[in-house]
Image: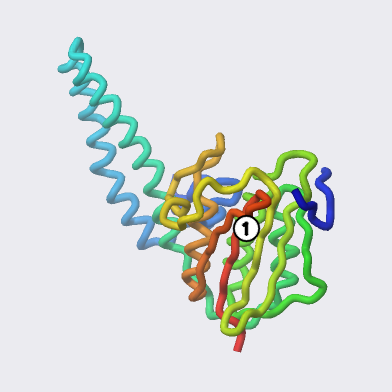
Amino acid sequence: MPAGPDQGGAGGNPPRVPPDKGGAGGDRPLPPDLARLLHDVRGPLNSLTMHLQVLKRTVAGDELAEDSLRTVQEQMARLADMLPAAFALAALEPEPLRSVELGGVMEAARDQAGGQVTLANTSWPSVRADEALLTLALGHLLRNAVEATPPGRPWPMVSAKVAGAETLVEIRDWGTGLKVTDPKLLLRLMHSTKAGHRGLGLVTADRVAQLHGGTLRFESPPEGGAVVTLALPSAM
């Protein structure tokens, strides 16, 4: 497997989304209108949960019914966890876009990655972006690359180039790779194969990409690892 340029080494407040090491909205409170809607949606969900406890007593001894009720309870608990994350994603909205030089964004995102990342460019293009949201998205993507990289493998590497109407930010890792590259299968809320993760990183990065008129793309190179590309409109 080809090596990269560096070797691996080393009460009344608005609802907040529990962070997924920097979750969908980081630690941002929901806007008041979405916080109110989330509160309203949680009401019937809580009521259903209480009534399920009553139903459990009525099916005691019926193995099939007990199994079905357990499944319902598990899915309701999952839904209760997903709702605030979904609302936090919906709450992500950009400030007016301005010209942002990607070098500073990359430095800030690398600080959030939790490990070593190689910045490949000596100079970086600019894009029109909300700098905070772009940093949030790239922080998620770099963290995923770091966590996918086993000890002894090259550090993940990030680069950027202008390709006509697009500016392509490419995150390359030499880790375990992707089983699928179809965004419809990868971009799923609260879906993660990693223990202790809530599955918010990719959907957050995709939301930020869409808010900027861009896309996320996924590749599994033949030599192993993964490439995730954040494609953004080139600055005019």
**Corner quadrant of residue 70:** top left
The residue shown at (51%, 45%) is: 18
Total tally of numbered discs in the picture: 1
Examine the rendered structure and indicate whether residue 65 appears above or below residue 78. above
- Front residue of 171 and 143: 171
The residue shown at (58%, 76%) is: 129
- Residue annotated with mark 1: 227
Residue 81 location in percent, x, y? 40, 42
Q: Taking 44 as reference, is 38 left or right?
A: right
**Corner quadrant of residue 109:** bottom right
Q: Amino acid at mark 1?
A: Val
Q: Specify the farthest residue to the front.
A: 222
Residue 1 location in percent, x, y? 75, 48
Residue 19, visible in the rendered structure: no
Q: Taking 199 as reference, is 79 left or right?
A: left
The image quadrant where one finds the C terminus is: bottom right
